[in-house]
């Protein structure tokens, strides 16, 4: 059985996958970021053993979170965190946000989100394939910005 990673190391592990991806691929930055995130998403962490304690979220849309509208592709890993009594306390999310200049074709795509949870009966490879089809929306476009961050929710 493969070694499980520490949740506290998740953001650093994602950063490391992005560095490896940039060094080993000549593909567009968007494709390289997706492949890095897929490698990261396949890692197993010592998360709380509940069905929704380790989730993957693929979502996009045109938003103005920073005051300026931009098309955002957000690849998120969510971990459930329990308190000392073993009860759910909060979630920690690790984000890889790819931001693109707004374009009519991207704006027309609207918004989309899809979850996958490790330790469920769902097939991870099938989910990746379905999300990769959605990724065609940004095609060969390169993001003007990629931001990695962690937040408590």
Image (cartoon, grey):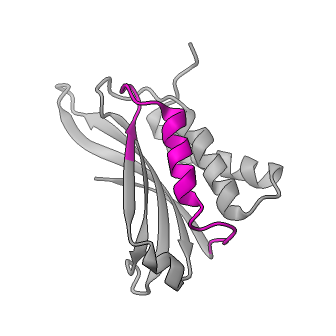
Q: Residue at x 70, y 55 (%)?
A: 32
Quadrant where the N terminus is found in the figure:
top right
Residue 136 in magenta? yes
Q: Residue at x 80, y 52 (%)?
A: 25
Residue 102 in view: no
The answer to which quarter of the image holds residue 113 is bottom left
Q: Residue at x 83, y 58 (%)?
A: 26
Task: Please state which of residues 110 and 20 is positioned toward the viewer in this rendering.
Answer: 110
Asked if residue 4 lies left or right of residue 50, the reply is right
Residue 60 in view: yes
| 16 versus 125 height, above or below | below
The answer to which quarter of the image holds residue 118 is top left
Task: Please state which of residues 73 and 87 is positioned toward the viewer in this rendering.
Answer: 73
Asked if residue 49 lies left or right of residue 132, the reply is left
| Residue 43 coordinates in the image, percent (x, y) | 55, 32
Residue 98 in magenta? no
| Residue 3 coordinates in the image, percent (x, y) | 56, 20
Instruction: Report the span colored magenta.
Output: 115-143
| Residue 104 coordinates in the image, percent (x, y) | 50, 85
């Amino acid at each position: 059985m493969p070694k499980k990673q520490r949740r506290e190391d998740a953001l650093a592990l994602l950063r490391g996958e992005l560095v490896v991806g940039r060094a080993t691929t000549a593909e567009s930055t968007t494709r390289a970021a997706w492949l890095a995130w897929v490698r990261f998403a396949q890692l197993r962490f010592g998360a709380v053993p509940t069905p929704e304690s380790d989730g993957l979220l693929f979502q996009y849309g045109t938003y103005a979170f920073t005051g300026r509208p931009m098309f955002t592709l957000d690849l998120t890993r969510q971990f459930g965190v329990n308190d000392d009594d073993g009860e759910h306390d909060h979630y920690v999310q690790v984000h890889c946000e790819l931001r693109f200049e707004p374009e009519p074709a991207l704006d027309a795509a609207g918004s989309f989100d899809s979850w996958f949870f490790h330790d469920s009966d769902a097939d991870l490879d099938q989910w990746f394939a379905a999300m990769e089809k959605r990724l065609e929306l940004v095609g060969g476009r390169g993001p003007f910005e990629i931001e990695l961050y962690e937040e408590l929710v």
